[in-house]
Image (spheres, rainbow, N blue to C red):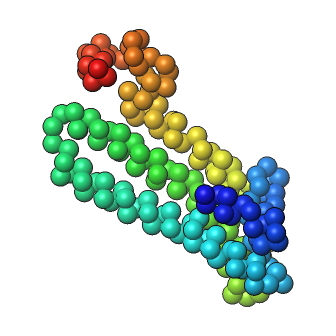
């Protein structure tokens, strides 16, 4: 819903998407001071809804999950679930870390524009690293799941139900019992 909400207004002149400096990724084109109020009226909600709120929500719910883990994860089976929770936390932090260059690039373009009235030249290294890191963030969940949780790794490789060749025999028996 958020993607649709922010994809439709540029079709009617509110906000603008364009290719980035490398020409590989379509990204939001930050407004100039000549753009007017309707461009800034699109940019501010974009930053709040697509940047600030998700980051606040991620850290709020990660903190809540860590607190609830300590309270409720007491027996052995629930301790196994802790591994999956930690894997999800790693995914969140790594994805956010890979989005930092894009946030720096956006800030580099937007803040001087609002404070001084001009858009400075973006360093070439930042212009290249930001879209590359952003695209790399899409592979983080699969890599984390494959490396951290045996059940997910076995499931992704199509061996969860009957073929447990990837798991140690004792571990495979545990998961086979939990499926039925």
x and y, in percent, of residue 154 in the image: 43, 22
Identity of the residue drawn at 69% across and 49% down: 132
Q: Quadrant of the C terminus?
A: top left
The residue sitting at the bottom extreme is 116
x and y, in percent, of residue 33 in the image: 79, 84
Q: Quadrant of the N terminus?
A: bottom right
Between 178 and 142, the one lying in front of the other is 178
Question: Toward which corner of the image does residue 111 lie, by quadrant?
Answer: bottom right
* In the displayed structure image, the side of residue 34 where residue 133 appears, left or right: left
Identity of the residue drawn at 64% across and 51% down: 133
The answer, for residue 124, to whether it is visible in the render is no
Identity of the residue drawn at 57% across and 53% down: 98
* In the displayed structure image, the side of residue 147 where residue 25 appears, left or right: right
x and y, in percent, of residue 108 in the image: 69, 72
x and y, in percent, of residue 88 in the image: 41, 45
**Vertical relation: 178 (above or below) 31:** above
The number of numbered discs placed on residues in the rendered structure image is: 0
Identity of the residue drawn at 75% across and 84% down: 37
**Vertical relation: 73 (above or below) 67:** above
Question: Toward which corner of the image does residue 9 lie, by quadrant?
Answer: bottom right
The answer, for residue 15, to whether it is visible in the render is yes
Between 163 and 132, the one lying in front of the other is 163
* In the displayed structure image, the side of residue 55 where residue 47 appears, left or right: right
């Amino acid at each position: 819903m958020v993607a649709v909400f922010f994809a439709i207004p540029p079709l009617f002149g509110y906000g603008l998407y364009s290719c980035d400096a490398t020409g590989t990724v379509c990204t939001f084109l930050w407004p100039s001071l000549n753009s007017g109020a309707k461009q800034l009226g699109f940019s501010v909600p974009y930053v709040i809804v697509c940047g600030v709120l998700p980051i606040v929500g991620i850290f709020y719910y990660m903190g809540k999950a860590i607190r609830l883990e300590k309270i409720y994860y007491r027996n052995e089976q629930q301790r196994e679930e802790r591994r999956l929770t930690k894997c999800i936390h790693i995914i969140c932090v790594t994805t956010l870390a890979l989005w930092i260059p894009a946030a720096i690039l956006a800030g580099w373009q937007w803040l001087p524009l609002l404070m001084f009235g001009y858009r400075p030249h973006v360093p070439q290294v930042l212009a290249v690293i930001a879209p590359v890191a952003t695209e790399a963030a899409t592979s983080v969940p699969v890599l984390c799941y494959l490396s951290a949780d045996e059940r997910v790794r076995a499931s992704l490789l199509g061996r969860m139900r009957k073929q447990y060749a990837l798991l140690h025999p004792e571990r495979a028996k545990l998961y086979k019992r939990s499926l039925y």
